[in-house]
Image: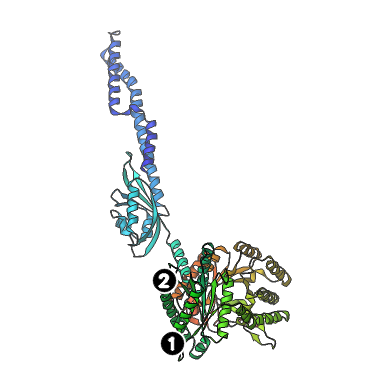
C-alpha cells in the first residue's frame, strides 16, 4: 500500500511546478517588487508634474498588474494543486480501507514488532474477538499450540527479508474452537523503502479441511476389519498387488497361507454369534503374536532383511498370512509352526482344542496374479479339510479339480438349468424415505427356485455365478422382470421405483448397455424410476468406459448407486470418479449403530462427505427403531432392512405405513 501511495505522489509531483518551494517563491517575489518600484520611479522622472495622489494610485495599480500574475502562478495555483492532490490521496486511502473492511477473508495489519493495529470485520466474525480486544496484541493469541515452532521461524525469516510468506495455520477462536486458515503475509514499506508494517490475509478453510479429514479417516477405517482390527480382504489384496508389481521387477518370492478354523459353524451354532465373534478376536490376537515371533526367529536364523508378514481377516472364519521372501521349504515349516501353535490355543467356551486347516500357495510357482493364487489357495484349503482337517496343504493340481467337482461345477449346472427353466425370480425389499416416512422405492433381489419349487437363498449360488461368469445372465432376468412390474404398476396409477444390481465386472460392456436400453423400450418402463446398484466396484476393469456407460444411462433419466460403500479404498475412488446419485452404506456400519460410537462416527462422516458431493445416502441392515432415529438425526435419506420390511414376492400395498411410527 505504501508503494502505491509513493507512486501516486510521484505522479502528482509532475503536475506541481518545481518553483513552488518557499525559498524560491520569496526570491521571485522580492525581485518582482524591486523591479516594479524601479519601473515606477523611472516613469515619474518623465512626469514631474504628477500629483502625489496620482503617484500613489499609479504605484498601487502597477504593483497589482505586475504581482497578480506572479501570485497566481507561484502561490495560488500550486496551493490549489496541493489541496487537490491531498484530497485524491485521502480518497484512495479510504478506498483501500473499504476493500479491507468488506473483504470476505480475515485481514489484519501489525506494526514492525508484530502488534496488531488494524483488523477487518471478517476477522472479528471468524475469531470471535472484537477489534478493541486485539489491537495492541500479538497474533500469537490465536495460536492453537499445534503449529510447529519451525513454521513461525520460517515465517519471520521470510517477511523480515521483504518477501511474502504463504502457509497454513490451525488457529484457535475466542471460544476455544479450532479453525484452519490459508495465510498470505506481506511486508508494507514506507516511501523510503523501509518495512514498517505487515499485512496478513487469511482464508478460512475449516470446512475443506473437515471434509478432507473425514475422507482420510474413512479411508483409514475402511482398510481394517471392524471385529478383529486386522487388515480386511480389500486392503490385503491391494498390498499384495503392490508387492507383486515389485516382485516381477526384482524376482522376489513369497507365499500365501489361507487359514480356516475347523468346525467354526458348530461353535457359532452351539454358543451363539457373540461367542463366535469373541473367538475370532482372540484368534486374531494370537495369530499376530505368532507371526511376529516367526518373523523375528526367521531373521535371527537366516539373517535376511525381509519385509514383515502381512496378516488379514478374509471374512467369516478365514484368515490369510502373506510371507515375503520365503521358498517352499521355509513356507511349509512356517505354515506347520502356525498350525501347531494354534493347537495350544485355548478358548474357554469350547471344551476341545481349536484346530485350523491351512492352504498354501507359492509365488510365482503357483501363479503370477492374485486371481490365480487365491483360486488355488482356496482349493488347497478345501483339500486340507477333505483330508481330515487340522493339517497344512501345499497346492497340488488335483486340488482344483477336487474343489470344482464338489462345488462350483455342480452349482454351475444347477444355475444354468434354472436359467433355461426360468426359475430365477425377483423379490422386493422396501426402502423407507426418512424425510417423510413413505415407501415408493424397492430393491429387486434375486431368488432361485429349485427343481421342487422351493426358494434357494442367494448365498448358495451368487459366488459360483460370479466365479463362472453367468451372474450377468441372472442380473438380466431380474432387471427385465422388475421393469415389467414397474410398467404394470404405472398403468394402475402407482409410481414405484426399483433398484437392480449390476456387477462392476460388466460395467462398460456395450452388449449390456444395448440390452438395458432395449429392455426399457420393450417394457415401456420409466427410466426416472430405475436405479442400478453397482456391486463389486473393485472389479471394474476400465474406469473410463464405466463412466461413459453411466453417463449414457443417466442421460435417459436412470440413476446409479454404489453398493457396500465404506468397505475398501475403491469406495472413495469411485465416489469421486463416477457420477452416481446414491451410496448404500455397508451394513457392517449399521448393524450395531446404536451401540457403537465408532460406527456412528463413521456413518456421520460418510453422510457428510456424500451430501457435500450432492449424493444421497441409503443405510442397509436397519433392524430397530433406535437405528432409524439415529439415521434421521444424521440426515440419511433412505433406510432398508428387516425393520422396514423383509423381501417379498410382491410390493407393499399403496397405503402401507411402517409398523411403528418413527
Q: Earlier in the sequence, mark 1 or mark 2?
A: 2
Q: Position of residue 87 (x, y in %)?
A: 37, 39
Split into 4 quadrants, where in the image is the N terminus? top left
Residue 524's image quarter? bottom right
Q: Position of residue 149 (x, y in %)?
A: 32, 57
Instruction: Specify few, some or many for label 1: CA neighbours under 10 Å numbering under 14, 14-19, or 20 or more.
Output: some
Say what secondary structure mark 2 lies in: helix
Q: Which mark is residue 347?
A: 1
Instruction: Specify few, some or many for label 2: CA neighbours under 10 Å numbering under 14, 14-19, or 20 or more.
Output: few
Q: Is residue 427 visible?
A: no
C-alpha distance separating marks 1 and 2: 31 Å
Q: Is residue 24 above or below residue 313?
A: above
The number of callouts visible is 2
Q: Please name whichever residue, 52 or 242, is drawn nearer the observer in this view of the structure.
A: 242
Q: Position of residue 609 (x, y in %)?
A: 49, 67
Relative placement, left or right, of 390 versus 131 is right
Residue 415's image quarter? bottom right
Q: Is residue 21 visible?
A: yes
Residue 455's image quarter? bottom right
Q: Please name whichever residue, 614 or 249, is drawn nearer the observer in this view of the structure.
A: 249
Say what secondary structure mark 1 lies in: loop
Q: Position of residue 91 (x, y in %)?
A: 39, 42
Q: Is residue 548 above or below residue 278?
A: above
Q: Please name whichever residue, 29 or 435, is drawn nearer the observer in this view of the structure.
A: 435
Contact flag, marks 1 and 2 (Cβ < 8 Å):
no
Q: Which mark is residue 299?
A: 2
Q: Is residue 351 above or below residue 426?
A: below
User: Which residue is rendered at x = 61% and y = 81% of the image?
Assistant: 403
Eye-nearest disc, 1 or 2: 2
Q: Please name whichever residue, 297 or 280, is drawn nearer the observer in this view of the structure.
A: 297
Q: Which mark is residue 583?
A: none
Residue farthest toward the left in the current orientation of the protein: 52
Amino acid at each position: 500500500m505504501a508503494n502505491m501511495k509513493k507512486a501516486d505522489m510521484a505522479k502528482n509531483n509532475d503536475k506541481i511546478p518545481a518553483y513552488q518551494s518557499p525559498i524560491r517563491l520569496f526570491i521571485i517575489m522580492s525581485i518582482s517588487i524591486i523591479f516594479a518600484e524601479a519601473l515606477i520611479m523611472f516613469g515619474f522622472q518623465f512626469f514631474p508634474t504628477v500629483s502625489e495622489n496620482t503617484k500613489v494610485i499609479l504605484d498601487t495599480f502597477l504593483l497589482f498588474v505586475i504581482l497578480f500574475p506572479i501570485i497566481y502562478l507561484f502561490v495560488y495555483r500550486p496551493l490549489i494543486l496541493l489541496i487537490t492532490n491531498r484530497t485524491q490521496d485521502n480518497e484512495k486511502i479510504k478506498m483501500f480501507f473499504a476493500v479491507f473492511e468488506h473483504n470476505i477473508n480475515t485481514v489484519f495489519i501489525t506494526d514492525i514488532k508484530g502488534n496488531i493495529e488494524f483488523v477487518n470485520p471478517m476477522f472479528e466474525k471468524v475469531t470471535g474477538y472484537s477489534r478493541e480486544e486485539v489491537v495492541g496484541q500479538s497474533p500469537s493469541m490465536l495460536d492453537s499450540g499445534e503449529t510447529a515452532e519451525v513454521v513461525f521461524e520460517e515465517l519471520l525469516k521470510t517477511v523480515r527479508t521483504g518477501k511474502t510468506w504463504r502457509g497454513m495455520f490451525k488457529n484457535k477462536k475466542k471460544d476455544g474452537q479450532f479453525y484452519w486458515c490459508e495465510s498470505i503475509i506481506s511486508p508494507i514499506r514506507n516511501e523510503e523503502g523501509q518495512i514498517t508494517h505487515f499485512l496478513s490475509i487469511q482464508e478460512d478453510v475449516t470446512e475443506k479441511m473437515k471434509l478432507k479429514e473425514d475422507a482420510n479417516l474413512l479411508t483409514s477405517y475402511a482398510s481394517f476389519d471392524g471385529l478383529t482390527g486386522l487388515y480386511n480382504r480389500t486392503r490385503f489384496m491391494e498390498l499384495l498387488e503392490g508387492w507383486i508389481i515389485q516382485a516381477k521387477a526384482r524376482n522376489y518370492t513369497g507365499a500365501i497361507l489361507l487359514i480356516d478354523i475347523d468346525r467354526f459353524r458348530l461353535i457359532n451354532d452351539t454358543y451363539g454369534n457373540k461367542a463366535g465373534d469373541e473367538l475370532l478376536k482372540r484368534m486374531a490376537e494370537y495369530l499376530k503374536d505368532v507371526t511376529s515371533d516367526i518373523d523375528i526367529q526367521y531373521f535371527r536364523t537366516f539373517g535376511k532383511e525381509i519385509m514383515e508378514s502381512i496378516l488379514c481377516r478374509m471374512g467369516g472364519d478365514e484368515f490369510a498370512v502373506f510371507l515375503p521372501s520365503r521358498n517352499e521349504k521355509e513356507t511349509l515349516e512356517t505354515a506347520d509352526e502356525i498350525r501347531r501353535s494354534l493347537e495350544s490355543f485355548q478358548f474357554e467356551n469350547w471344551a476341545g482344542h481349536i484346530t485350523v486347516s491351512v492352504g498354501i500357495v507359492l509365488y510365482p510357482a503357483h501363479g503370477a496374479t492374485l486371481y490365480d493364487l487365491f483360486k488355488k489357495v482356496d482349493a488347497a484349503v478345501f483339500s486340507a479339510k477333505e483330508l481330515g482337517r487340522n493339517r497344512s496343504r501345499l497346492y497340488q493340481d488335483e486340488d482344483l479339480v477336487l474343489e470344482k467337482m464338489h462345488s462350483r461345477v455342480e452349482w454351475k449346472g444347477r444355475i444354468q438349468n434354472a436359467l433355461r427353466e426360468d426359475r430365477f425370480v425377483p423379490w422386493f425389499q422396501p426402502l423407507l424415505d426418512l424425510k417423510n416416512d413413505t415407501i415408493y422405492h424397492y430393491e429387486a433381489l434375486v431368488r432361485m427356485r429349485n427343481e421342487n419349487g422351493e426358494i434357494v437363498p442367494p448365498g448358495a449360488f451368487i459366488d459360483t455365478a460370479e466365479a463362472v461368469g453367468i451372474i450377468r445372465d441372472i442380473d438380466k432376468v431380474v432387471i427385465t422382470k422388475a421393469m415389467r412390474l414397474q410398467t404394470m404398476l404405472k398403468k394402475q396409477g402407482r409410481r414405484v421405483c426399483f433398484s437392480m444390481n449390476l456387477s462392476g465386472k460388466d460395467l462398460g460392456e456395450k452388449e449390456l448397455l444395448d440390452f438395458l436400453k432395449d429392455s426399457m423400450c420393450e417394457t415401456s418402463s420409466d427410466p426416472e424410476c430405475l436405479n442400478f446398484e453397482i456391486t463389486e466396484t473393485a472389479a471394474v476393469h476400465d474406469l473410463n468406459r464405466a463412466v461413459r456407460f453411466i453417463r449414457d444411462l443417466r442421460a435417459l433419466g436412470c440413476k446409479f448407486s454404489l453398493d457396500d460403500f465404506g468397505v475398501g479404498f475403491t469406495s472413495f475412488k469411485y465416489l469421486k470418479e463416477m457420477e452416481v446419485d446414491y451410496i448404500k452404506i455397508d451394513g457392517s456400519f449399521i448393524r450395531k449403530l446404536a451401540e457403537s460410537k465408532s460406527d456412528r462416527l463413521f456413518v456421520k462422516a460418510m453422510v457428510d462427505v456424500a451430501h457435500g458431493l450432492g449424493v444421497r445416502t441409503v443405510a442397509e441392515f436397519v433392524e430397530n427403531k433406535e437405528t432409524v432415529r439415529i439415521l434421521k438425526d444424521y440426515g440419511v435419506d433412505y433406510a432398508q432392512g428387516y425393520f422396514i420390511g423383509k423381501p417379498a414376492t410382491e410390493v407393499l400395498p399403496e397405503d402401507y405405513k411402517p409398523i411403528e411410527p418413527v
